[in-house]
Amino acid sequence: MDPEMDSQLKIGFIGAGNMAFGIAKGILSGNALPANIKVSAPSSRNLGRFQELGVAVTHSNEEVVSGSDLVFVAVKPHLVAPVLTEISEHVTERHIIVSVAAGVTLATVEELLPENSVAIRLMPNLPCLVQEGALLFARGSHAKQEDGALLRSLLHRCGLVEEGPEAWIDIHTGLSGSGVAFVYLFAEALAEGAVKMGMPSALAHSIASQTVLGAGKLLRESGKHPAQLRSEVCTPGGTTIYGLHTLEQGGLRAATMSAVESATERARELGRK
Ligand SMILES: NC(=O)C1=CN([C@@H]2O[C@H](COP(=O)(O)OP(=O)(O)OC[C@H]3O[C@@H](n4cnc5c(N)ncnc54)[C@H](O)[C@@H]3O)[C@@H](O)[C@H]2O)C=CC1
Ligand SMILES: O=C(O)[C@@H]1CCC=N1
């Protein structure tokens, strides 16, 4: 989409939580204008920070739908059905409805919207806030390639945006939607290890976050397999291989694989509700 169109598209958010805020911030760092964005939530609690972005806020979901071309549904998964039921009569063929709810399938979304509605399922993650998200979307049965292209263009400043089959969305939820929390747990443990060895906590946390950032940036920018980079850090008989041996004994690799598996299974379970 050309930047001109990008700046004219009317964008709505139903739900004013952490993920809506992350996507809104990412979008606003591109060509979208705050005046073209409207957000709804039942209480004013979370709306203040959107107002600080210059975005219009309301308590009416209907108002968001009526005034938008593309609407992100960013409520908790169990609220998607009641919200779609509520807005359904206001959804027309001009709308693109984008659900970011974990687990909720395109079939469920399409069933609750008028026939032939354009629906897209998107799984973002919280680093959209700093334009380093990892987002995967799948198009519903009436969403054309150009609808996907429009969404991709809108989100391009949120981070890496990929399209795939719907079956991969739950996996991406475990890998990346939830995966960021797994990385935070690891970062916390790194820092706590340093605190245990006598380093002041603030410095340990600052160095741990820079270590995660630097490792991630090098991994992405080098395009190397993580095992290759890991071997480049390891001096034979040096410190790293001793530490890695301890991590393997603690089952970090198996535990991490199981974490992605559990989160994926949970997303699938949420989708069956
Ligand atoms: N937080 C994250 O890292 C990620 C969250 N998601 C998905 O995003 C969705 C939202 O998650 P969060 O932002 O974390 O939740 P949150 O609890 O921070 O936000 C939910 C928002 O929905 C609003 N809301 C509640 N009932 C509503 C209604 N009837 N109409 C309009 N708004 C209503 C709440 O006031 C709140 O502002 C979930 O479905 C989750 O699966 C997806 C990827 C990552
Ligand atoms: O925990 C959750 O269910 C959501 C989906 C991915 C990240 N947060």
Image (cartoon, rainbow, N blue to C red):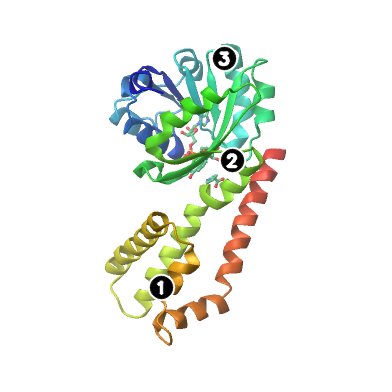
The span from disc 1 to disc 2 (Cα, nearest Å) is 37 Å
Q: Residue furthest right?
A: 272
Q: CB of residue at label 2: within 8 Å of ligand 1?
A: yes
The kind of residue on which mark 1 rests is: Glu
Quadrant the C terminus occupies: top right
Vertical order, 134 against 142 (above or below)? below
> Whole-percent x and y of residue 171?
61, 48
Q: CB of residue at label 1: within 8 Å of ligand 2?
A: no
The kind of residue on which mark 2 rests is: Ala
Q: Is residue 48 visible?
A: no
* Disc 1 residue crowd, few under 14, some 14–19, many 20+, Cα 10 Å: few
> Whole-percent x and y of residue 225?
49, 62
- The label nearer to you, 1 versus 3, is 1
Q: Which residue is mark 1?
A: 232
Q: Which residue is mark 3?
A: 91
Q: Which residue is mark 2?
A: 102
Quadrant the N terminus occupies: top left
* Marking on residue 30: none
For residue 114, side relative to residue 41 (left or right): right
Residue at point 38%, 18% (across, down): 5
For residue 30, side relative to residue 189 (left or right): left
